[in-house]
Image (spheres, rainbow, N blue to C red):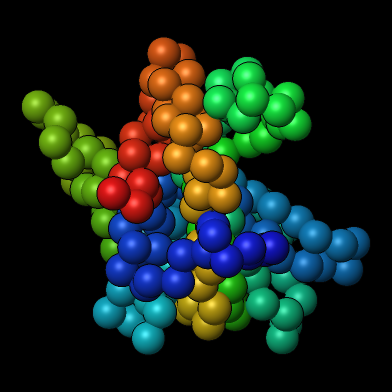
Amino acid sequence: MHLPAAFREDRTPVLHDAIRAIGLANLVTVGPDGPVATPVPLLLDERDGPRGTLIGHLARANPQWRTAAAGVPALAVFMGPEAYVSPSWYATKRETGKVVPTWNYVAVHAYGPLEVFEDRDSLLAVVTALTDRYEAGRAEPWAVADAPADFVDALLAGIVGVRLRIDRLEGKWKLSQNRPAADVDGVIDGLSGGGEGERRVAAAMRARRPD
């Protein structure tokens, strides 16, 4: 990922927080026919390895887990809040007119070797952890144990587990840090009047302001 200094984020705890908040990643591998990507929720175990480990599962019918080239790192792409930025929001537009549109976003890339596992207990642990993570906070959370055991076993037979031990972790918070303060204020104001995604970008921009 291209990482200009103004947008680069290297702090592992910040990157881990973003991974947990985003949840869904595009898991990218290289096979005999080129790159393959699958959207998949991944859990982070920050205690496993210096940069953590990502764990999830793929459908057994998905050929990606069979065709991923050995020795070639996999890539998990986590895309956070993103929004189009209109040049009409810049104070610079009124001053010089020398502005163009852009896009603000948060992204985290995690690279590492991809391991596959198929034993029932490990698969059940992953499915249970994912369920507990995303059912937490619901008034009546659903649990894997709520489903019949034979039904769960049949579903487990249809998936394979994947584990990506993170060797390299990159973060990019492209939030107008390269613009004058008045332009940043204009973008925050413009995005704050938009939908949920735009407002999330505005909030991320406020959090990154030097003051």
Please name whichever residue, 181 or 45, is drawn nearer the observer in this view of the structure. Answer: 181
Query: Quick check: 53 left or right of 27?
Result: left
The residue positioned farthest toward the front in the image shown = 95
Please name whichever residue, 84 or 123, is drawn nearer the observer in this view of the structure. Answer: 84
The residue positioned farthest toward the right in the image shown = 33
Q: Which image quadrant for residue 135?
A: top left
Q: Residue at x 27, y 42 (%)?
A: 134
Please name whichever residue, 4 or 141, is drawn nearer the observer in this view of the structure. Answer: 4
Q: Residue at x 36, y 47 (%)?
A: 209
Q: Residue at x 59, y 80 (%)?
A: 113
Q: Quadrant of the N terminus?
A: bottom right
Q: Position of residue 151 (x, y in %)?
A: 36, 42
**Is residue 147 in view from this perspective?**
yes
Please name whichever residue, 52 or 95, is drawn nearer the observer in this view of the structure. Answer: 95
The count of marks equals 0
Q: Which image quadrant for residue 75?
A: bottom right
Query: Quick check: 20 left or right of 161?
Result: left
In the depicted structure, whether residue 184 falls above or below residue 191: below
Q: Position of residue 119 (x, y in %)?
A: 42, 72
In the depicted structure, whether residue 19 falls above or below residue 167: above
